[in-house]
Image: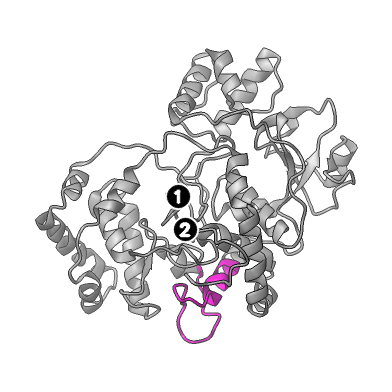
Amino acid sequence: MRLWAGSGLVSLFLSSGLAADPLAHSIRPVVRPGADMVQLATAPVLHSLRPAARPATAVTEASAMATTGDAAQFRAWIEAFRSRATAEGIRPEVFDRAFQGLTVDPEAIRRDRNQSEYTKTIWDYLDSAVSDNRIANGRAALNQHRQVLDAIEARYGVEKQVVLAIWGLESAYGAVRGSDATIRSLATLAFEGRRAAFFEGELIAALKILQAGDVTPDRMRGSWAGAMGHTQFMPSSFLSYAVDFTGDGRRDIWSDDPTDALASTAAYLKHFGWTRGQPWGVEVVLPRGFDFTLANREIRKSPAEWAQLGVRGADGAAVANHGPAAILLPAGGQGAAFMIFDNFAVLERYNTADAYVIGVGHLSDRILGGAPIRSAWPRDDRALTFAERQELQQRLTAKGFDTQKIDGRIGPLTVNAVRAYQMAEGLMPDGYASLRVLQRLR
């Protein structure tokens, strides 16, 4: 499924982990690349927290026309697209009803082009993602929807608190599902041309949803980028994974009743291999003298093997055997450490950013009464700006530590380059792309 950035979503590159390009994911679950809902227990959290970043790109001729709202050009595009849509099996009457009176949405174009210059650190992100309000509202939602959540868990084998946490981060438990007309948003972005092929595909999928009768055009609403419903499915993800859990003949993720949306999220996670009873991850304490080159997603050991190397749970006990696990240091060696299991990678299908996955996982733990993260974060650090991340990559590459791309995204290639540089310099090889590393490179 494809999910994406939407109304009220935080747009950011994360200072650690892989920054998520919303267009690279599915259901807004993603395929990994290279409101009156709940009786709120306390003040509502009125924003979603999907980290996403859109790389800057050149403005095309079509996007310039879209910005000025060239109605004639847009009508001509619609006529041309109508032929392509009908060739894909969309009935003319379905198309014409969906496009009746449609105009360009300049706000969608503006937001799609927006490039966040400053970023949030993982601790700032988690402060919001797993705030006291979001935890309390999650517990209220659990109490309100426990019966249906139990049934969803029994059907799909995905723990109810995990589904709740995704709901909490995607739409603040249904409070910010988005109010933009999906067909208008997708048509605008397809016409604009920056990612025409992607958005045309999503637009065809949205028309297929209308043709199937799951929703009417006036009710098909969501984010400015086309993500829909309580858990922000992109149309193509909806077609592949959405389910009719209520049995009313429609897969209705837009209703005030979140049942179908929550079940669809569980169905998505099950499809990608969710293991019931396995944690996403466990906070751990590393021993003095730990070899930080072992903190690598490609190096997996059993919890017993990690225990032999001195890695213990935050509570001091050995971590239970939940299968092979890797050590993740989202803020380098000076921040919290996690032992992450296969379910971490399943959550990455929703969004590839480490912070998002940790946010979902930790929120799910806290909803059930789990403890806060115990380790301190390096809160004196600040996140690198987009320009600084590019400079870091340029300087690393110039010194022979090739990041392979100068894109301002701190993904595995850049982390490996940072780690290699740190080892050459006799520094802690934690791969953390910090301001200190950049200053040393300078």
Q: Is residue 174 above or below residue 53?
A: below
Which region of the structure is painted magenta? Answer: 241-267
Mark 1 packing: few (<14 Cα in 10 Å), some, or many (20+)?
many
Residue in view at x 66 percent, y 14 percent: 424
Kindly indicate the quadrant of the structure image that contains residue 327.
top right
Q: Is residue 253 magenta?
A: yes
Asked if one can make out residue 411 in the rendered structure from this viewpoint, the answer is yes
Q: Judge from the rendering whether residue 122 lies leftward or rightward of residue 69; answer left or right.
A: right
Say how the picture is coloured: one colour
Residue in view at x 81 percent, y 28 percent: 290
Q: Is residue 147 above or below residue 128?
A: below
Q: Which residue is mark 2?
A: 3
Q: Which residue is mark 1?
A: 22
Asked if one can make out residue 145 in the rendered structure from this viewpoint, the answer is no
Q: Which residue in the rendered view is the most extreme toward the front?
A: 43
Rendering coords of residue 111 (x, y %): 34, 48
